[in-house]
Image: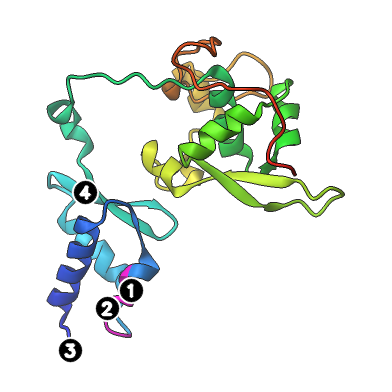
Amino acid sequence: MTMDRFQQLRVLEAMLFSSADPVPEKVLKARLPEGSDVDILLQELKSFYSNRGVHLVSVGKKVWAFRTAPDLSDHLRIDTEIKRRLSRAATETLSIIAYHQPITRAEIEEVRGVATSKGTLDILLEAEWIRPRGRRRVPGRPVTWGTTEQFLDQFGIERIEDLPGIEELKAAGLLDTRPGLMSLGQISDGSDNADSDSYEKNEGDIARD
């Protein structure tokens, strides 16, 4: 079946629009004729939507999705507020993983200076913000952790390299005063209370490294 360039753009647009989740580039490519230049087609779509109500954005390495334009957020805000806080421990753990990935649980604990509970990692796993990244080639072969495409999408980051640096965090008041810790203050109210709406759970070991 032949498909001209305009039709290829329409197919890509329809696939991205109809998907509830970001779509990997390889999935898009599989729907187009062999030899189609998906990179160029996606950039053309991205340019077309750059001034519209929705933008085509990359939410990770070769993963694409439509998202509402950032400047329209005030018009789309839902009045009902749903509180879903992360505990300080979860916030710190997520920050450390984001900046030091791939990283083991023991290395996370070394940076934080305290033990990391299984509940903390479970919450980040349930949110699909972290995932196992393999095992260290050392005795015991501990699991290493890294962030996911969902993490990038949640925080509006195109690539992990786009995370703010130390000076930017200091300027924004988001860098923890304790040495070695970098906190993503945007996702925490700074509370250490693990009993209210935070998601800290039982202390324990991670799924057996």
Q: Which residue is mark 1?
A: 29
Residue at disc 4, secondary structure: strand
Q: Mark 4 near mark 1, Cβ–Cβ under 8 Å?
A: no
Residue at disc 1, secondary structure: helix
Marks 3 and 4, Cα distance to the nearest angstrom? 28 Å
Q: Which residue is mark 2?
A: 32
Under mark 4, the amino acid is: His
> Residue 159, position in %: x, y?
45, 48
Q: Mark 2 near mark 1, Cβ–Cβ under 8 Å?
A: yes
Q: Earlier in the sequence, mark 4 or mark 1?
A: 1
The residue drawn where x is 44% and y is 57% is 61
Magenta range: 28-34
Marks 2 and 4, Cα distance to the nearest angstrom? 22 Å
Q: Which residue is mark 4?
A: 55
**Which coloring applies here?**
rainbow
Q: Local crowd at mark 2 within 10 Å, few (<14), some, or many (≥20)?
A: some
